Image (cartoon, rainbow, N blue to C red):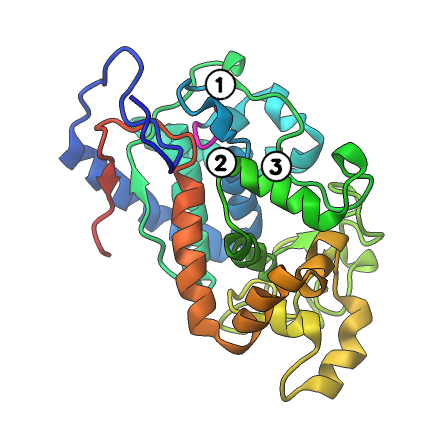
Amino acid sequence: GPAPSAGVTSAAPGGGSGRDVRAYTDTLAACAKELRVFIDEENCHPILIRLAWHDSGTYDQAFVASWPACGGANGSIRFAPELAHGANAGLKKAILYLEPFNEKFPTLSWADLIQLASATALELAGGPKSPLRYGRLDVSSSEGCPPEGRLPGAYPPFPGEVDAATHLRQVFGRMGFSDSEIVALSGAHTLGRAFKERSGVVSEGYGKGTGTVHTNAETGRPRLDSAPGLGMAGGKSWTQRWLAFDNSYYTDGQHAGSTASEQKTSTGTLLEMPTDAVLRTDPIFRRSYLRYAHNPRAFFADFASAHAKLAELGSCFDPPEGILMPEH
């Protein structure tokens, strides 16, 4: 039956398939190894993380007892009706990236492959290693896709004409997250960009002609190792080094720290949406925001645990206790 608070449905409906845990673990490790090479070559860390979060983020704890109606990390995002949701614009590309891995490692569920790619991308970008479990079951058809409208919006009007802080609390509260977890998870915007052609929240689009100084291959060095390369040029990033995972979402956002003058000059080139800005202005969110700006270790610890929780929302595991990845 369903586990209480974490939103994990522990047993497969109709009984488990009796997975060979050792073989499955070996396959996870082999797939992760190939994902690392692919992600490093393509610089596609952000879109794979976004794919996993959008598969998870449809979870509604009101339906905890009923899988897959509860939504969450069940692989449903691979189906066309869900990819067509407005919040998922551009994510077809991420599914296309993962299709060869699905073909090569067919015993891995799509739900696991999606979360494995995200966790691998986070780690490669310098992020914390989250204690993720695997063994998720997939929804088998698009009938298992959740209704549209469960993912957070970026700009008003928000549903019910509420303000940005209330909107974030409604959406993440429905998934079971606290205020501090909302601020920690928002820190994933240290990675990635927005595009005119996808979310439409920025005027910068595909290609170097419309990007910023940070998203143009000639001027930007966003990778953790500062090597050249950033995938497709264009778009607008939240941070200057948007392929490196650190706490710069908070430090760039408040223009704090030793490089204040340098930060101020490049502000116009960085993205901040109302749902980002409110983390600094709401008195409760602000406490966590400032803590993460000043304490990267606290951010990494809180992010790792919130990410592990997000990655299991609505997941149904076989075996029920899940499968842990061996250390590599």
Distance Cα–Cα, label 3 vs label 1: 22 Å
Mark number displayed over residue 121: none
Mostly what secondary structure, the magenta segment? loop
Q: Position of residue 312 (x, y in %)?
A: 39, 38
Q: Nearer the viewer, mark 1 or mark 2?
A: 1
First reached walking from the N terminus: tag 2 or tag 3: 2
Q: Position of residue 242 (x, y in %)?
A: 61, 63
Mark number displayed over residue 91: 3
Q: Is residue 71 visible?
A: no
The quadrant the N terminus occupies is top left
Q: Amino acid at mark 1?
A: Ala
First reached walking from the N terminus: tag 3 or tag 1: 1
Q: Position of residue 90 (x, y in %)?
A: 67, 38
Stretch of the chain drawn in magenta: 69-74
Distance Cα–Cα, label 1 vs label 2: 13 Å
Residue pointed to by mark 2: 56
Inspect the magenta stretch and tell me whether residue 282 lies in it.
no
Q: Is residue 99 left or right of residue 167?
A: left
First reached walking from the N terminus: tag 1 or tag 2: 2
| Residue found at the very far right of the displayed protein | 203
| Closer to the camera in the image, 260 or 198 | 260
Q: Tell me, yes or no, whether the two marked residues, 1 and 2, touch with CB atoms within 8 Å.
A: no
Q: Residue at x 50, y 25 (%)?
A: 62
- Residue at disc 2, secondary structure: helix
Q: Amino acid at mark 3?
A: Leu
